[in-house]
Image: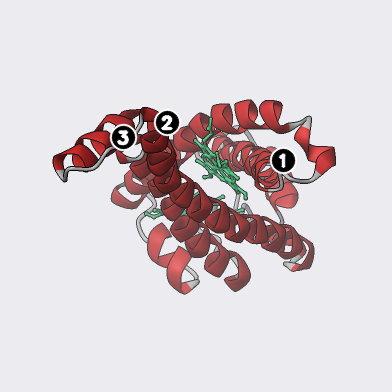
Amino acid sequence: MLNEPVLFQQTKPTIIRIWHWLVFLFFAASVSTVVVQSLFFKTRDNVQMVQNKVTEKGGLITPDQAKNVAHEYSDKLWDLHKYIGFGISFLFIWRLVAEIIIAKEKKIKRRINIAQNLPESNKDKKHYLMVQYSYLIFYLLFLIMVSTGLILAFEDVALLKSLHRTAKNIHSLCQWGMYGFMLFHITGVIIAECGDFNGIVSRMINGKEAN
Ligand code: HEM
Ligand code: HEM
């Protein structure tokens, strides 16, 4: 059919492209804090090291004091994670506002509708829909990470105290979904770029229509 839209070749609006690369930066920074924390700054792993270093220099320190020192470093890193998280929360609101103001045919719901109405013979239909559904799953996980992260960040608010444990468990569990999406997405983009859809990464940067 002549009038069928060419899937995967539509450009994203500037407001989404800038948002996307900021999301990439902030998510990379957030995940780095989690990785550095679990590799080097777990309180439990560092108590013995603090004790050894102090006694090496001729000082005296109880395990409880050493635990407090080790915990301070871990807290610093979580503070950084929290501030990056505020940036991520702002980006979530940015994406919501963008969805409202972008052209109708660029909205995710409309993109899915257009693809669903294409004939089954369209070779990219299934693939394109799978990619759009993966974005929907990502946005759901994004909402969960931001809301549970904010509950953890404002733990001093009396109303949120009772939700702390549940939020921590959900936040901790959903991180795996996020890593799953990132792996799936970046692998998919690289395969697409090297295969039939070359130019999608530069299009996501410069926004120029494919020739
Ligand atoms: C890619 C997104 C994110 C990932 C992978 C992630 C991952 C994690 C992980 C693994 C923990 C430790 C949970 C535990 O102790 O069991 C954590 C804690 C936390 N996260 Fe996130 N997070 C993300 C986004 C956010 C956002 C958007 C916020 C919002 C402010 C946030 C705020 C927090 C806070 C306040 C804590 C508790 C730190 C503490 O124990 O003092 N996170 N996060
Ligand atoms: C933290 C890592 C990343 C996240 C969370 C992420 C998230 C997303 C999301 C949600 C979209 C869809 C935007 C929308 O239309 O609503 C998207 C599109 C896209 N991303 Fe990423 N991204 C990440 C990293 C990357 C990287 C590293 C690349 C390049 C190597 C990349 C290339 C693209 C491209 C080319 C598209 C457009 C694909 C299409 O036309 O459907 N992304 N990304």
Mark 3 nearby-residue class (10 Å; few <14, some 14–19, many ≥20): some
Q: CA distance from mark 1 to mark 3?
A: 58 Å
Q: Residue furthest left?
A: 56
Q: Secondary structure at mark 3?
A: helix
Q: Nearer the viewer, residue 192 or 30?
A: 30
Is residue 8 in sight in this rendering? no
Picture disc at residue 46: 3
Tell me the amino acid under the disc marked 3.
Asn
Count how many numbered circles sit on residues in the image: 3
Residue beneath disc 2? 64
Dividing the picture into quarters, in which one does residue 95 lie?
bottom right
Tell me the amino acid under the disc marked 1.
Asn
| Ligand 1 located in image quadrant | top right
Tell me the amino acid under the disc marked 2.
Asp
- Relative image position of residue 82 (x, y in whole percent): 56, 52
Residue beneath disc 1? 117
* Circles 2 and 3 in contact, beta carbons < 8 Å: no
Q: Is residue 73 left or right of residue 147?
A: left
